[in-house]
Amino acid sequence: MSTSPYMLPEKARHQDAPSHGLSINDMFPTAIPHSAGATTAVLQPLTAKMKTEHVNFYYGKFQALHDISLEFASNKVTALIGPSGCGKSTFLRTLNRINETLRDTRLEGSITLDGENILDKDVTEIRRRIGMVFQRPNPFPKSIYDNIIYGPKINGMLKGKNAAEIVEKSLRRAALWDEAKDKLHESAYALSGGQQQRLCIARALAVDPEMLLLDEPCSALDPIATAKIEDLLVGLKSQCTIVIVTHNMQQAARVADTTGFFLLGRLIEHAKTDIIFKNPSKKETEDYITGRFG
Ligand SMILES: Nc1ncnc2c1ncn2[C@@H]1O[C@H](COP(=O)(O)OP(=O)(O)OP(=O)(O)O)[C@@H](O)[C@H]1O
Ligand SMILES: [Mg+2]
């Protein structure tokens, strides 16, 4: 077995683990007090904010996703890793129905949010509840202020609310307030790349999403901007369930509670992040994280 900074080679593999990964309550066992008088807090079983079951996705005749079943635990960060072209972005885009905008595509299987099928819901509502941030910052050609207020405005969230307060709160949540507060009415394009990415996160947060999907949000950023976004994600998870696609395994190790490894359109393994990096069940996962392929 080859070595990697993440691996514990002497540990035995969990070869019996199911191929789709563990359920969230297998990953995070709950503590039960020994007696009625015990002071130990009872940890509630984790709930799945979102669940995909047997998801297949096709671009025309090409099947990009095969039978993906995965649970996203509420208020946790889930990282999706895997080699280029393995379907991470396709999968992420099915979660808030962005893929529907592409012609000649087909989704099979079920995706539920709080137990309800997202396909039965109004698509605008789903996209408000599940925000998305892309690899390249994509602010609108508008001022910083107008970028933030756009979502609340089109979602009818401004009634009786102070727009300036929403702008400040969103920029603070995205750790951009101090840098942006004196130029709120200047073009968003006047911000640096890292600031623009935080603006896109602030814009996504302005509509109070319950989930945030991020597709390689730091790939174009320097280590300082990356560290700010990672801190931000860890801080946000108390309010939001986060899914992040990343090629940076150190990033997954730093921010994610659980990590899913994809290969050729399949979910090979989903487990607690330290298990994935130190003691994965599947040989394919081990080969990937030790740099043998990908
Ligand atoms: N719009 C599209 N039309 C047709 N095929 C597509 C489309 N987008 C992606 N694919 C194909 O689906 C597969 C998965 O692509 P996807 O972009 O989801 O991979 P990825 O894991 O995000 O890769 P990367 O790490 O390079 O971003 C690839 O074979 C890709 O060529
Ligand atoms: Mg991608």
Image: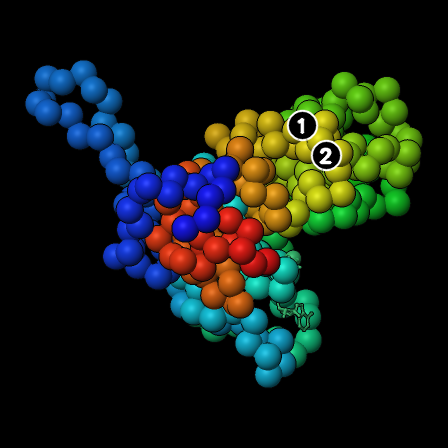
Residue 179: quarter of image: top right
Q: Is residue 285 above or below residue 157?
A: below
Give me the C-alpha separation between circle 1 and circle 2.
9 Å
- The percent coordinates of residue 30 (x first, y second) are 25, 35
Nearer-N-terminus badge (1/2): 2
- Label 1: how many residues lie within 10 Å, few (<14), some (14-19) or many (20+)? some
For mark 1, give the secondary structure. helix
- The percent coordinates of residue 202 (x first, y second) are 69, 35
Q: Is residue 253 left or right of residue 182?
A: left
**Observer-nearest of 238 and 283:** 283
- The percent coordinates of residue 247 (x first, y second) are 62, 48
- The percent coordinates of residue 100 (x first, y second) are 63, 68
Q: What residue do we see at 76% from left, 48% from top?
A: 136
**Observer-nearest of 266 and 145:** 266
Kind of residue sitting beneath label 1: Lys
Residues at badges 1 and 2 in contact (C-beta under 8 Å)? yes
Q: What residue do we see at 66% from left, 29% from top?
A: 227
Count of labels in the image: 2
> Residue 198 — which label?
2
What residue did someone put label 1 on? 228
